[in-house]
Image: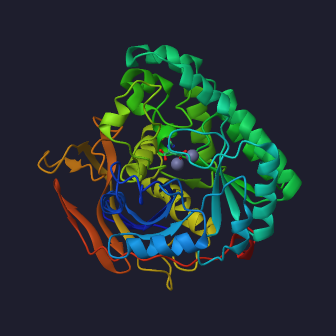
């Protein structure tokens, strides 16, 4: 799946199936132009954007309008996940594969979640409607208890360690168990997002073995940081679901390495520095990550298995970041690999180069600028192993870097067509 180019590797353009590019309505945090620069600098040539914008994206018609809005602003090709209101999931019946093949459902609420489905009867209806419409449900599986606790918290960032100690992890585990029960009842095809605990990985793996149509995603943040990091960095490292314990992280790595995980998604969710510097109760959860994802996970793999052949590690990353997302989201007829007939999306990756994320151009030859509009990264100060040197989308160079200088191509990324999960051959 990879070609060796003398220490440099040619990978297919990556698909990040979990980004919040904040357009429309939240462009003070991030906008499509900045975010798509961050994406190509991270080797990503296709993104699937989340619906929690202002207004939220819920219908096929809105998807058409959003695609129109983005014309001429994107370096990457794109698709959208739709949102759904628990009160009336019926618009899902009218969604064609052109518009979307997947729908994100929040089981718990936080600052940036407009549509939360709390009512059990509504949730049943959403699962049923998605199953009947051949749509894949993407689950934000957490419990509202977590957020209730958060709202009561009045501490300052100095008290963050204490706050994190009390933040329950059981909410996510209970929510995943609930999701599996609904899948059993309705046969809905489900992808659980940002699994963060060992128990979730166990439950989801067992369910898949038992034949339920469930897969799951892990984020680079949960593989890179633990709750200890949150205590050190404070509210800036806050995300939803929260960073967990060392044992959880080890379990997630095992799931990644043994093929239990279907996709890695960056959950690129930028907020401004000012927003993140509020007290823990006020700071919105979420971190940028589309630029950091490939290299952060590659760095983690190297650290864990320094003597494993680089090719094996890169093949694993290609599987999780290109092939599987293409299969899951109906893009495999044009994206997800280096095969004749697919789009000419390539990434030239130097697996050995060590570098750091810097605040801007001119930070020195061993550094790269942060391209997200939010201007910060949880990985600042990290030494990254493996660097994207060149990104090509549809045969055109969209990113090139030399030293600390970056160059970008034309923002002519397109809205992609896709097939439904039910059209995809069973694996
Ligand atoms: C995301 C956001 O800010 O949009 N935040 C997060 O902490 N992950 C929302 C989400 O993915 O749930
Ligand atoms: Zn989420
Ligand atoms: Zn997200």
Query: Relative to 411, is 21 on the left or the right?
Result: right
Number of marks in the image? Answer: 0
Res 236 → quadrant:
top left
Q: Nearer the viewer, residue 396 or 167?
A: 167
The location of residue 343, given as percent across then percent down, is 45, 80
| Relative to 180, residue 389 above or below | below
Residue 206 in sight: no
Residue at position x 60%, y 72% in the image: 60
Name the image quarter holding the C terminus: bottom right
Residue at position x 63%, y 24% in the image: 168
Residue at position x 22%, y 43% in the image: 358
Res 253 → quadrant:
top right
The location of residue 209, given as percent across then percent down, is 80, 51
Residue lying furthest right: 185
The location of residue 164, given as percent across then percent down, is 52, 21
Res 392 → quadrant:
bottom left
The location of residue 413, given as percent across then percent down, is 38, 75
Residue at position x 69%, y 67% in the image: 91
Residue 70 in sight: yes
Q: Nearer the viewer, residue 290 or 158?
A: 158
């Amino acid at each position: 799946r990879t070609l060796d180019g003398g220490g440099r590797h040619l990978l297919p353009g990556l698909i990040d199936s979990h980004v919040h590019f904040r357009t429309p309505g939240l462009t003070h945090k991030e906008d499509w132009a900045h975010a798509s620069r961050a994406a190509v600098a991270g080797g990503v040539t296709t993104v699937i954007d989340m619906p929690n914008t202002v207004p939220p994206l819920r219908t096929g018609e809105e998807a058409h309008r959003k695609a129109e809005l983005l014309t001429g602003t994107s370096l990457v090709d794109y698709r959208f996940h739709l949102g759904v209101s628990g009160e009336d999931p019926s618009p899902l019946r009218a969604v064609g594969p052109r518009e979307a093949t997947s729908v994100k459902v929040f089981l718990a609420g936080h600052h940036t979640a407009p549509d939360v489905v709390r009512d059990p009867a509504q949730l049943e209806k959403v699962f049923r409607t998605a199953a009947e419409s051949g749509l894949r449900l993407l689950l934000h599986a957490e419990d509202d208890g977590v957020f209730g606790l958060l709202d009561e918290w009045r501490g300052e960032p100095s008290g963050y360690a204490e706050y994190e100690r009390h933040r329950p992890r059981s909410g996510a585990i209970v929510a995943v168990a609930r999701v599996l029960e609904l899948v059993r009842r309705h046969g809905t095809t489900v992808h659980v997002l940002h699994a963060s605990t060992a128990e979730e990985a166990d439950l989801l793996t067992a369910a898949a073995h038992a034949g339920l149509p469930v897969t799951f995603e892990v984020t680079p943040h949960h593989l890179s940081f633990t709750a200890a990091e949150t205590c050190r960095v404070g509210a800036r490292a806050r995300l939803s679901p929260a960073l967990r314990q060392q044992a959880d992280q080890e379990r997630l790595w095992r799931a990644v390495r043994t093929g239990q995980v279907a996709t890695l998604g960056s959950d690129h969710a930028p907020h401004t520095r000012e927003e993140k510097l509020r007290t823990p109760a006020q700071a919105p959860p979420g971190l940028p990550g589309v630029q950091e994802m490939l290299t952060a996970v590659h760095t983690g793999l190297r650290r864990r298995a320094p003597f494993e052949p680089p090719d094996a590690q890169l093949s694993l990353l290609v599987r999780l970041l290109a092939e599987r997302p293409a299969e899951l989201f109906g893009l495999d007829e044009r994206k997800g690999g280096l095969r004749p007939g697919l789009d000419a999306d390539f990434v030239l990756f130097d697996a050995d180069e060590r570098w750091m994320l810097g605040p801007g151009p001119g930070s020195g030859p061993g550094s790269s600028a942060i391209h997200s509009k939010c201007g910060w990264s949880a990985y600042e100060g990290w030494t990254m192993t493996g660097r994207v040197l060149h990104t090509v989308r549809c045969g055109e160079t969209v990113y090139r870097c030399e030293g600390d200088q970056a160059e970008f191509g034309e923002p002519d990324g397109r809205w992609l067509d896709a097939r439904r999960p039910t059209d995809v051959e069973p694996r």
